[in-house]
Image (cartoon, rainbow, N blue to C red):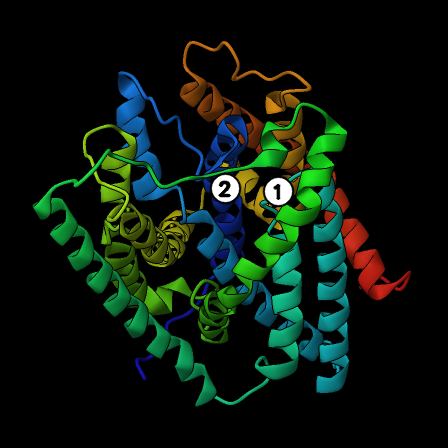
Amino acid sequence: MPARGPVRAGERALAPDLARGAMLLIIALANSATVFFATAPGIDKTPHGFERGYNVFLFLFVHARGIPLFAIMFGYGLVQLARRQQTAGAAPAAVRRVLVRRNGWLFAFGSVHGILLFSGDILGAYGLVGIVFTLVLLQRGERLYRVPLGYLGFAALAVVALAVVVVAGLVSGPAGPSVIPTGDSASMAAGSFTAAVAARLTEWPMTVLTMLPFILFVWVGAWAARRRVLEEPRNHRRLLRWGAATGLGVAGGLPMGLLAGGFLEVDAETGPAVKLLYEASGFFGGIGYLCLFGLLALALTRSSRTNAVVGALAALGQRSLSGYLFQTLAWTVLASPFLLSLGTGSASPTFTAAIAAMAVWLITVLAAYAMQRHAYRGPAEKLLRRLTYGRGDR
């Protein structure tokens, strides 16, 4: 193994929190578009002007990138939490009990969130994944942790195979009318809160089921945490550089972006392959972002000057659960047909959704920074800790 250099205290703490804070902007851009257009993925199917280029941007850097990044960071956090418990003297069985209890409550949070507000909720699925991962995989030996690395190779082959199918379909040309493969959401288009809840009673369980295979993404995050890739970015610079360049360089979302921007046409036969290609490549985009944030944290901590912007972003990362839940509440108020419905009648619903996403995210950044300065935890984090540990909150 290469020699490990000294690790600064600020560097150790900054990178994971910075990644979580920045991750919420990616999730905000993706989810706001999903709610404003009541489709998955969220796009205006008839873009004009600069909207066309923005659609390309969404599929290259946003859609299908945020959820894998969330899953990777979730796995990273599981290992961090287990390590803190062990450092405090907890036995392995006690660590498992704490993590199972915490993830059980996370599933409960997701149930309420997914049924009342947003059927695309990811907390419920990750709560279940967290329980399974804790009981089956978390405390296993190094040999088993090679499995997610093998999955990376398999995923790369899948992306290449899908790219070949897409290119073949494009070369042969559309055999019928051009289609954009998206799915409509009944709950997001519902005209009343009760109708939306009724739709989410079936939509949210399906979301949970489709996300359970993301345990592989969680596993990759746990692998990175066991090596302290983000806590010690100085010792993993080569890995972080390679991961950022390769992960963000996988342009599997380009055909879907060109299609959504009106620059490309595909028929109903090729459309599903185009959609699968952008979804499969999103995992590598998530890894690329994780590595990019690690490099950014390393660069920032080389300076001894305090950066309020970085501090605010890291503060949001420490309160990412509260930030995520606040976003959904904001989309419900801003975009629901039975509330403000800002996208209706807007000259550009696409950019209305984008501006709303950035504004809501910025509000959470400022609020988190204010809480950090006054030593307040996020409300959702505080509640989750109380439910996990009881009044003996640690």
Where residue 21 sits: x, y (%)?
Answer: 53, 44
Q: Is residue 186 above or below residue 104?
A: above
- Give the x, y percent position of residue 367: 66, 32
Residue pointed to by mark 1: 324
Nearer the N terminus, badge 1 or badge 2?
Answer: 2
Viewer-side residue, 3 vs 129: 129
Label 2: state its secondary structure: helix
Q: What amino acid type is highlighted by mark number 2? A: Ile
The reply to whether discs 1 and 2 touch (Cβ–Cβ < 8 Å) is yes
Residue at image x 40%, y 51%? 293
Which quadrant of the figure contains the C terminus? bottom right
Question: Which residue corresponds to the image point at 88% horizontal and 63% vertical from the top-left?
Answer: 390
In the picture of the structure, the residue carrying the numbered disc 2 is 27
Q: Does residue 91 show up?
A: no
Tell me: 184 left or right of 268. right
* Residue 47 placement: quadrant: top left
Identify the residue at the far left of this view: 171
Give the number of the disc on residue 173.
none
Give the mark count.
2
- Quarter location, residue 135: bottom right
